Image (cartoon, grey):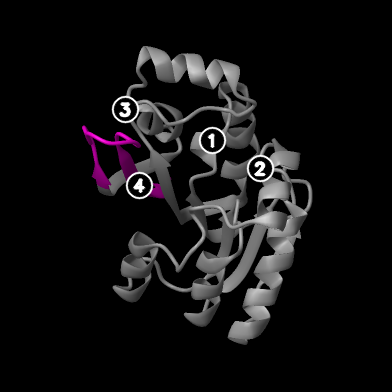
Amino acid sequence: MKAFYNLWYRHGTPPWVGPARSELVRLVESGRVPPGRSLDLGCGEGDNSIFLAQHGFDATAIDFAPAALVKARAKAEAAGVAVRFVEDDLTRMSNVAGPFDVLVDYGSFDDLSIQDRDSYMRAVVPLLRSGGLFLLWCFEWIPSRWERAAVAALPFGQMALLPGEVERRFGAEFAIERVAGESGLRGWPHGWAAYLMTRK
């Protein structure tokens, strides 16, 4: 999977690349997510972390695709902000150390296999301080039979989280608020959600 994403970033632009995500912008500009030490999990080309750095955050960002980080560093330099971009694996996290005040994950956790989601939980959650905030954006729906077959055939993890999976996986460690989302969409993807979670 790493090689696939690295080639995609090197030779093209994945569809999720673009300006800082609207939920993050709203939460930061409203003051609900105040400046602090932030970690962007699976940062891609770094747009969210660049936005955070522009708004007073001490921003660190990780991705396992070196080609993505090359583009991210160039964007940060062009924007005139300092972001620490680090190559690392979300299931092991050997190159960054907490505690962080804010974690941001836009579409990385839901892309992992079930086993890798378990590893992510062990690697990522301890990096956030008590009282820290975790903004998690994910695709979320019950996959159809053909979608389950496609997932089994492709060299990826999963397509989406199941409804209730965020609460099941994170509920013991976090107070969870669903801050945005849509479900039952007729097109694809069929649903998504954004959660703002506070570590207990």
Residue type beneath disc 1: Asp
Label 1, on which residue?
111
3D distance between C-alphas at marks 1 and 4: 16 Å
Are dots 1 and 3 in contact, CB under 8 Å? no
The picture places residue 138, in percent across and down from the top left corner, at 41, 42
**In the rendered structure, which segment of residues is drawn in magenta?**
181-200
Task: Relative to 9, say whether 200 is above or below.
Answer: above
Q: Residues within 10 Å of mark 2 (few under 14, many from 20)?
A: many
**Are there few (<14), some (14-19), or many (20+) residues within 10 Å of tag 3?**
some
Q: Nearer the viewer, residue 79 or 137?
A: 79
Circle 4 packing at 10 Å, graded few (<14), some (14-19), many (20+), is some
For marks 1 and 2, give the CA distance: 11 Å
For residue 161, above or below residue 144: below
For badge 3, the amino acid type reads Pro
Q: CA distance from mark 1 to mark 3?
A: 15 Å
Residue 90 got which mark? 2
Q: Evaluate if marks 2 and 4 touch, with contact meaning CB atoms under 8 Å apart.
A: no
Reply above or below: 199 against 45.
above
Mark toward the start of the polypeptide (2 vs 3): 2
- The label nearer to you, 1 versus 3, is 1
Q: Mark 1: few, some, or many residues within 10 Å (few <14, many ≥20)?
A: some
Among the two numbered marks 1 and 2 on one chain, the one whose residue lies closer to the N terminus: 2
Closer to the chain start, of discs 1 and 3, is 1
Q: Is residue 14 visible?
A: yes
